Amino acid sequence: MSAAALPSARRVTWLRRRRALAGVWRDFRHHRPGMIGLVFLGLIVLMALAAPLLADEAGLRAINATDNPAFASPSEFGRLGTDGLGRDVLTQFIWGSRISLLVGLAATVLAMLIGSVVGIAAGFFGGRPGGVLMRITEWFLVIPFLPLAIALAAILGPSIQNIIIVIGITSWPSTARLIHAQVLTLKERDYVDRSRALGASNWHLMTRHIVPNVSPLILANTTLTVPIVILSEATLSFLGLGDPTNASWGQMLDDAFESGAITVEAWWYIVPPGLGIMLVVLAFTLVGQALEEILDPRLRDQRA
Amino acid sequence: MSARFISRKVLGSLATLAFVVVFNFFLFRVVETDPVASLFRGKELTQTQRAELTRQFGLDGSQGEQFVRYLGQTASLNFGRSYSTNQPVWEEIKDKALPTIALVGVAAILSAVLGVMLGIAAAWRRRTKTDYAVTGFTMSTYSMPDFWLGMILLTVFAVGLGWFPVGGITDPASNATGFAKLLDQAQHMVLPAVTLTLAYLGEYAIVMRSSLLDTMREDYLILARAKGLRDVMVRNRHAVPNALLPVVALMAINFGFVLSGAIAVEAIFSWPGLGLATYEALKGPDLPMLQGLFLVFSASVILFNLIADLLYAYLDPRVRTG
């Protein structure tokens, strides 16, 4: 048999991965709550991406809304009514989805990066350095998230970039602990021992055996972290720590509260941003739980 | 539970507390602000007045000196003076702790009881309409920002229907005392307490449901049924007590967040507790106040985590031998 007829090892791996991914998708398609979440998510992401087509960004600035009545209800003004400055609520809702999603995704990516690196490093190298890393992780786990995030955000000042950093560096510890535990069991597998005996370097072991095997866990954990991050962003923005020039849904609720929307019963201004947050959070949670059930063999058995 | 297990847990908590205290110092030193200048902006200050104020705020001397002084003061609960009211931070925190403990304590207990009951109902009637309704409801409340729920309840029931006061803890116009005053305060507490209860109960229901589903697969439940015990008996005597374990731990951990849990909700209802104090300190920012609040919030979480660990070990022997 000539060597040319055999596919390369890299190709075999690639084909195997693609098959595994197709399998996950096949299971996911039959998971009703997961699919409902995915469709919802798709619609909201579509709205965020198409914001410039759906609403004129100029409508976000109060200077362009001086002719409109303040706190006009949907029946008086049409669409979703206006806020205390006469700005169209629907325009703010559509553009706010961009900021909420952007911060939610970016801060999650940051948290996952820190959590994965710490978890993999601590688990793979173990010993004293690993112990120290996990001790630090435990410390960050017990520091109450919201006060810490508030203190950090107050110190760094309000901007989108800072709020991403603040949420990212306060949300990683639970991921680190989860991944650490997984790496500890992977490290003891026979194929890792065999690979090491064949002379594989730490780098090879980590990139070829450890990381591919923890990545499903990271994926499921990511989709379950996004909703928590989006809720955190809403709370921080509501407390006045968000970026007032790039209003997220949380910032809209802060504006509504500060401008007295409650006293004038401007429900059309209060309901949409909160409902948006709730639907995004719900959608991500449904998708995340579905992925977790499909990817975690322990949970898969329970379903049967 | 062995003395060794307890002392190891207690020492671990003390180490964590020490970490938080040190972390707290550096966290608030990262920021380069001059509170003396910002507090007396526009006013002429003599050199001596300025030096005196800097000393009062504990901002004189090198970082090292400040750190040593900070450790000594923290140990004696001296967190400095608030920039905005010039009162000692510890006194401010002491005054505001009670309303928060009352409000969040009530909500924590109500949400735990209701959440556990909902979780049991959903798990025991798995894949029925009851289960779908409970799961849908708890997932929805769990996904809401708590302060948004508060804003809606406030708009509908206080402003719209006028059933409840719009905020605060007492009616400023009344000078009632004794029982009448307590009744007034209770009426002010209804909406914020309902908000927090709804916000918290989802987690309990979800945890209780999945824990009970796990327990229902255990062999001893099959045995209990095989003995011919009635369904209610199997549930209340055999399944629920065992399934409650993770809920108890969750409860202890959540009680740790009682002090810091309601920042945004207290702000919505202008409930004069630690949450509202945090909200107002942020506007300054009143750094000594924030620093003191951060320490108190962290200490309460650490304390209740310790209680959760010990309680869990007491209730579940597998933890302390493992």
Image (tube, coloured by chain):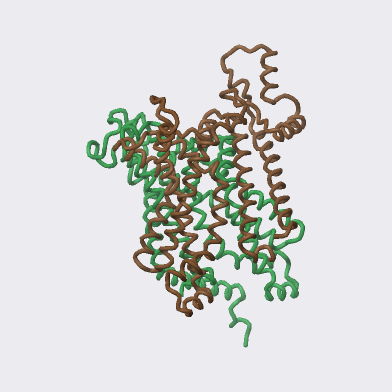
Chain colours: A green, B brown
Q: Residue furthest front?
A: B178
Q: Residue furthest bottom?
A: A1
* B162 versus A275 height, above or below: above
Which residue occupies the foreground of this view, A196 or B49? Answer: B49
Residue B122 location in percent, x, y?
A: 41, 63
- Can you name the residue that lies furthest to the left here? A75
A60 vs B229, nearest the viewer: B229
Residue at x 63%, y 65% (from the top left corner):
A182
Q: Is residue A193 left or right of residue A262?
A: right
Q: Is residue B102 visible?
A: yes
Figure quadrant of residue A263 = top left
Q: Nearer the viewer, residue B313 or A20?
A: B313
Residue at point 68%, 75% (across, down): A191
Left/right of residue B73 with respect to residue B146 in the rendered view: right
Q: Is residue B292 above or below residue B246?
A: above
Task: Report whether residue A19 is seen.
Answer: no
Residue that appears at 63% across and 43% down: B299
Q: Residue B86 at x, y = what percent?
A: 60, 23
- Report the front residue among B302 and A293: B302
The image shows residue A90 at horizontal and vertical percentages of 32, 42
* Number of marks drawn: 0
Can you say which quadrant of the picture contains the N terminus of chain A? bottom right
Image quadrant in which you'd find residue A178: bottom right
Q: Is residue A119 above or below residue A262?
A: below
Question: x, y percentage for residue A223?
Answer: 49, 58
